[in-house]
Image (cartoon, rainbow, N blue to C red):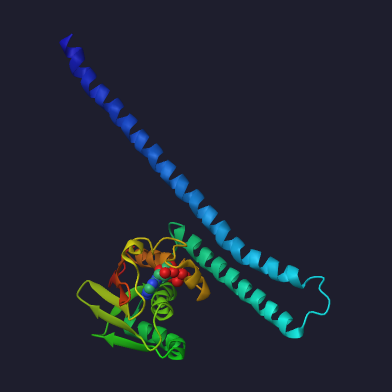
């Protein structure tokens, strides 16, 4: 009668809630599974490409009598370049996989971010000089913060390396540092080719490259920004990108001054 109805209402709702939660979980698992297979197939493809080139190059030398010395040298140089590329992809992949583990432990140190940025620019200046790109550091104030020196350095280095790689000859790259009472802010701005609007939301994805062949030519693996975003996230920071095609790109990073695990 009346009392039973009253009881059966919450019962029914609960079943519904559980079914709903279960369906949501299944859907989420399906998405995870799909992105995992996509990742595995991307990895296989990326690892196979240099391998295929090496095989073709080596095959054309094997069993050939009297290959002219300069041709032989050229093929060997190409093979070496493909090995270097394979190595870069594997190194980047291992870095990413290590980060995916939940407690990828950070070696947090309280340190000068001004110094950290100066060191990065010092290391990359010879590469920028080769294309007469002006590399500028704007430190608005002394900043000390908690970071993992190696990981944070490589995250920011990726941004500066990209700003040089995807720049025009005689262009500029401006790295700036500022802070307030809670956060510090690093921006890396360049005068480069920019990123098309419809690619902007995808550049942090693993293996995503705006121009596959161009990026490959200049040695890109498509994993750099995925690593950078993951590292910034581990520091509880955020990274954003602004870009205009043909004018340039700005990456802005915001990280808390103190690290709370
Ligand atoms: P890659 O190893 O190809 O450089 P990243 O993950 O570092 O891979 O970057 C992904 C893609 O985003 C690049 O291939 C490039 O197309 C684009 N990109 C990254 N940084 C810049 C930049 N500063 N200017 C223009 N395009 C950029």
Residue 119: x %, y % from top left:
40, 86
Front-lying residue, 47 or 244: 244
Does the rendering let one see residue 157? yes
Does the rendering let one see residue 109? no
Quarter of the image with the N terminus in it: top left
Residue, far top: 1
Residue ID at (33%, 76%): 246
Front-lying residue, 140 or 243: 243
Residue 181: x %, y % from top left:
19, 74
For residue 38, side relative to residue 19 (left or right): right
Q: In this view, does 132 lie above or below 241?
A: below
> Dividing the image into four equal quarters, which quarter contains ligand 1?
bottom left
Quarter of the image with the C terminus in it: bottom left
Residue, far left: 2
Q: Is residue 225 above or below residue 71?
A: above
Residue ID at (30%, 71%): 243
Q: Is residue 213 above or below residue 16?
A: below
Residue 197: x %, y % from top left:
31, 65
> For residue 83, which quarter of the picture?
bottom right
For residue 33, side relative to residue 143 (left or right): right
Q: How many marks?
A: 0
> For residue 158, which quarter of the picture?
bottom left
Residue ID at (36%, 34%): 23
Residue ID at (43%, 91%): 129
> For residue 48, which quarter of the picture?
bottom right
């Amino acid at each position: 009668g009346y009392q039973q109805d009253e009881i059966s209402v919450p019962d029914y709702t609960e079943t519904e809630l559980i079914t709903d939660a279960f369906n949501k979980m299944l859907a989420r698992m399906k998405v995870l599974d799909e992105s995992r297979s996509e990742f595995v197939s991307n990895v296989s493809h990326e690892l196979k490409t240099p391998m295929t080139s090496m095989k073709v190059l080596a095959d054309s030398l094997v069993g050939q009598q009297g290959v002219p010395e300069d041709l032989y040298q050229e093929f060997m140089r190409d093979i070496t370049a493909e090995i270097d590329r394979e190595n870069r992809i594997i190194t980047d992949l291992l870095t990413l996989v290590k980060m995916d583990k939940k407690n990828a432990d950070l070696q947090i140190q309280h340190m000068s971010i001004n110094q950290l940025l100066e060191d990065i620019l010092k290391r990359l200046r010879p590469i920028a000089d080769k294309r007469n790109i002006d590399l500028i550091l704007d430190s608005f104030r002394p900043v000390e913060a908690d970071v993992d020196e190696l990981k944070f350095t490589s995250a920011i280095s990726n941004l500066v390396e990209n700003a040089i790689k995807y720049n025009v000859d005689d262009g500029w790259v401006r790295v700036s540092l500022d802070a307030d009472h809670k956060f510090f802010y690093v921006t890396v701005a360049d005068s480069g080719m920019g990123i098309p609007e419809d690619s902007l939301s995808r550049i942090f994805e693993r293996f995503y490259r705006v121009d596959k062949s161009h990026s490959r030519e200049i040695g890109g693996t498509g994993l750099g920004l995925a690593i950078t975003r993951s590292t910034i996230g581990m520091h509880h920071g955020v990274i954003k990108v602004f870009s205009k095609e043909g004018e340039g790109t700005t990456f802005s990073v915001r990280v808390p001054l103190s690290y709370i695990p």
